[in-house]
Image: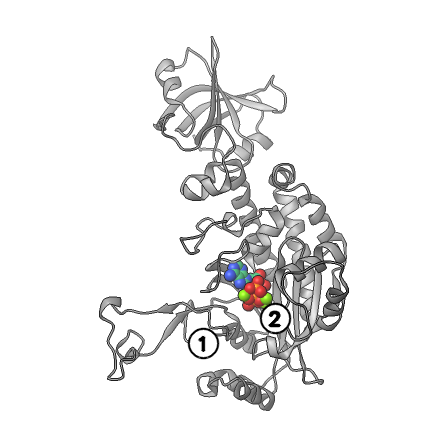
Amino acid sequence: MMTRRIADILKNGQPDESVKVQGWVRTKRELKDFAFVEVNDGSSMANLQVVLNPDLADYATVIKQLNTGASVEVEGVLVESPAKGQRIELKASSAKVFGEADPETYPLQKKRHSFEFLRDIGHLRSRTNTFGAVFRVRNACATAIHNFFQERGFLWIHAPIITASDCEGAGEMFAVTSFNLDKVPRTEKQEIDYTKDFFGRPAYLTVSGQLEAEIMAMAFSNVYTFGPTFRAENSNTSRHLAEFWMVEPEMAFCDLQGDMDLAEEFLKYIFKYVLETCAEDMEFFNQRIDNSVLATADNIINNQFERLTYTDAVKLLEKADKKFEFPVSWGLDLQSEHERYLAEEKFKKPVIVTDYPAKIKAFYMRLSDDEQTVRAMDILAPKIGEIIGGSQREERLDVLEKRIEALGMDAKTLWWYLDLRRFGTVPHAGFGLGFERLVQFMTGMANIRDVIPFPRAPLTVEF
Ligand code: ATP
Ligand code: MG
Ligand code: MG
Ligand code: MG
């Protein structure tokens, strides 16, 4: 008999149907004449209740083995459930235990565990309700992202992980080396001799696939990346990881306006998709994690995002009757507390801030006619702050060359990037969405480490 997923049985199963399920025991209740076992296979939040009778072969042994955490295969017949809150249950005709879990040492006890504790047992936390829901929602977000772009004719491109260019120019790159770190070859001046390294020059883990996406957009018009990116920055915050996933669409023949419109439509689309496909999980987050989760989703889907310039944002922040930790003044970057104030308190919805000072933004952004600001946009979300960063790109060769020179960057290493402006240049734009920040925003989870299966961050961290 084919194994059926529990989500499917709970939704579509009919009385008298014979089924086989496989999963892990969540709870066991022994009564005088029979036992109830709740089984979960990860396909849904809800468990399937299995009823075991003493006429089952090896009843006594099986019941003894079926403790929380044990893996089991059950065959039987579906029956209407007399219990409240569940439509159907499984009357077992056979049960096979694959692996027991000792109740004395199994770390997941029948109580609420703190997320900090669960991070320490990352190999088991996916068996809890919260992490089951998180990773199902994460999967739905990823599906929605691909659907959104594929429906619109975007090409999914695969940017390299190992690269030589620091796209953001922020010096947050992890070096990649084949050297044995105890015996790194040095030059006579005691510098590291990269000519002897694997690539013959310094190499790094990518901080963004944008520059490669631009290359591909200059042939395919509309493309997107969706892959891991790495930053050696302060990850001791609740919204930074050393390894995170980014979604980066890049559109040829597109300006900042088109970029913002696409980003807003994109976020609305993902929220709609997740509400439709993960209703039960979203309900759970709303009840157990953050009681504004469903209202936030509704807000995203049904309201236009607020749009304002950086200059106006700074004015609002200067006028705010709130004490900020970090200073606000034209020319300084917005900090997360400022971003959150705008989205959470001032406008109570996502805010798109545009036209940032050129000085605080990356070299590739399109300089405006005032020569002080660039056509950049950040989307700020309540509770999170920046969730998307995007811009129109500088398509004019002479302006770009001047910018690269002014920043002291090496134009020679960017010859290919400049070539794109030499041959058939077009206005183009794109943005980067932090995938984990999206999942955080959607689920209400407070810490970004709890929305990625295997968080990468410095070990010595206290929260
Ligand atoms: P922040 O100001 O929060 O440090 P950023 O401006 O440095 O972000 P960008 O270079 O604009 O980040 O990257 C695009 C998006 O990637 C951000 O809007 C954010 O959603 C996400 N992101 C950036 N850094 C991280 C990180 N360390 N961990 C998780 N997501 C990140
Ligand atoms: Mg940063
Ligand atoms: Mg930022
Ligand atoms: Mg940014």
Query: Which amino acid lies under the numbered mark 1 shown in the image of this protein?
Result: Ser
For the residue labelled by badge 2, is the local secondary structure a helix, a strand or a loop? strand
- 183 horizontally vs 397: left or right: left
Residue 308: x and y in percent read 75, 68
Question: Can residue 154 be seen by looking at this rendering?
Answer: no
Q: Which residue is depicted at the point 59% across and 84% down?
A: 425
Residue 426: x and y in percent read 62, 82
Name the image quarter holding residue 97: top left
Q: Is residue 379 above or below residue 169?
A: above
Q: Which residue is depicted at the point 63% across and 61% down?
A: 325
Q: Quadrant of ligand 4?
A: bottom right
Q: Which residue is depicted at the point 46% across and 19% down?
A: 92
Residue 441: x and y in percent read 62, 51
Query: Which amino acid lies under the numbered mark 2 shown in the image of this protein?
Result: Gly
Name the image quarter holding residue 154: bottom right
Q: Is residue 118 above or below residue 33?
A: below
Circle 1 sits on which residue? Answer: 165
Residue 46: x and y in percent read 56, 32
Q: Is residue 412 above or below residue 131?
A: below
Calculate the distance from the C-alpha at mark 2 to the C-alpha at mark 1.
Answer: 18 Å
Determine whether label 2 and label 1 are within 8 Å by CB: no
